[in-house]
């Protein structure tokens, strides 16, 4: 069995990292909730751990499930790769359009303190009751991760999971420093511009993969 080199691992790991970051770093209820908990210093570790673990589980299920399904249907794999490239191009365009508008992330005051169970229930609701979570992690990230060689899919999952863990950790534990930044529309405009360009690069990479000749 041939060993996998660092030169093979790194691009796959980085692709998973950038894709996950591009999808997760956005103004939304889940991020606002994590930021709020960080500002309140209330059950931050359980919230961060739950959100990161949920993403890791969904991404893993998506990649492995998609890999099994697409492995039996090469034509479907190519179609999913083309659809993923189109989606990433569209997502990048949307991010660049957002970069032209002023927006901000505000963490609303949650009122009186809640128990850890109540806070985790809210985290679960924000995470698991959002259909976009499944579209992003299971379908999109899963189908793109499944395009990777079998020996490298684990590194793609690792990159995506590290991105999620790093983002939620920074958001929760760095809330005191990040909240003023995220309240500035200019910061989100710059971030959205970077996300848009990153999504276009990933779209081009996926398109090249989809159009590459299939080896026997």
Image (spheres, rainbow, N blue to C red):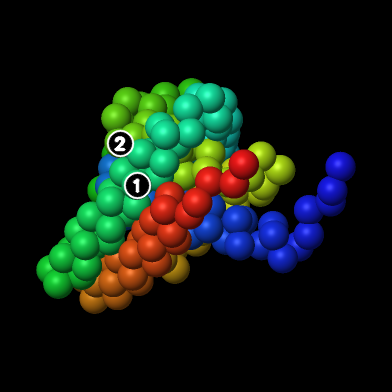
Asked whether 40 or 174 is in front, the reply is: 174
Residue at point 38% right, 27% down? 128
Q: In the image as oriented, which residue stretches furthest toward the front?
A: 216
Closer mark to the observer between disc 2 and disc 1 = 1
Residue underneath mark 1: 82
Query: At x 33% / y 70%, what residue is drawn?
Result: 197
Left/right placement of residue 182 relative to residue 48 reads left
Say if residue 121 shows up in the picture: yes
Disc nearer the start of the sequence (2/1): 1
Q: Nearer the viewer, residue 42 or 134?
A: 134
Q: Eyeballing the image, is 45 above or below 126?
A: below
Image quadrant holding the C terminus, namely top right
Task: Identify the secondary structure beneath mark 1.
Answer: helix
* Labelled pair 2, 1 in contact (Cβ < 8 Å): no
- Quadrant containing the N terminus in the rendered view: top right
Q: Which residue lies furthest to the left in this view?
A: 101
Give above or below for 69 relative to 193: above
The residue sitting at 47% across, 44% down in the picture is: 144
Residue 132, numbered label: 2
Decide: few, some or many residues near mark 1? Use Cα within 10 Å; few <14, some 14-19, many ≥20: many
Query: 29 or 205, which lies in front?
Result: 205
Position in image of residue 56 (x %, y %): 56, 37
Q: Which mark is residue 163?
A: none
Q: How many labels does the image show?
A: 2
x and y, in percent, of residue 153 in the image = 63, 43
For the residues marked 2 and 1, what is the alpha-carbon distance in whole angstroms? 20 Å
Instruction: Classify 10 Å Cα crowding around label 2: few (below 14), some (14-19), many (20 and above).
Output: few
């Amino acid at each position: 069995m041939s060993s996998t080199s660092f030169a093979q691992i790194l691009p796959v790991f980085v692709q998973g990292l950038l894709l996950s970051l591009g999808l997760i770093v956005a103004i939304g209820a889940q991020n606002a909730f994590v930021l709020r908990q960080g500002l309140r210093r209330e059950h931050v570790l359980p919230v961060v751990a739950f959100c990161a673990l949920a993403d890791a589980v969904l991404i893993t299920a998506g990649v492995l499930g998609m890999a099994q399904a697409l492995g039996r249907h090469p034509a479907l794999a190519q179609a999913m790769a083309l659809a993923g490239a189109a989606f990433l191009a569209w997502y990048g365009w949307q991010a660049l359009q957002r970069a032209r508008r002023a927006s901000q992330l505000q963490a609303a005051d949650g009122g009186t303190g809640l128990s850890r169970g109540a806070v985790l229930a809210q985290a679960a609701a924000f995470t698991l009751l959002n259909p976009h979570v499944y579209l992003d992690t299971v379908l999109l990230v899963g189908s793109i991760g499944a395009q990777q060689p079998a020996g490298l899919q684990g590194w793609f999952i690792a990159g995506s999971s590290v991105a999620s863990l790093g983002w939620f950790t920074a958001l929760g534990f760095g809330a005191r420093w990040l909240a003023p930044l995220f309240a500035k529309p200019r910061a989100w405009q710059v971030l959205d511009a970077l996300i848009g360009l990153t999504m276009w690069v990933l779209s081009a990479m996926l398109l090249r993969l989809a159009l590459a000749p299939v080896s026997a």
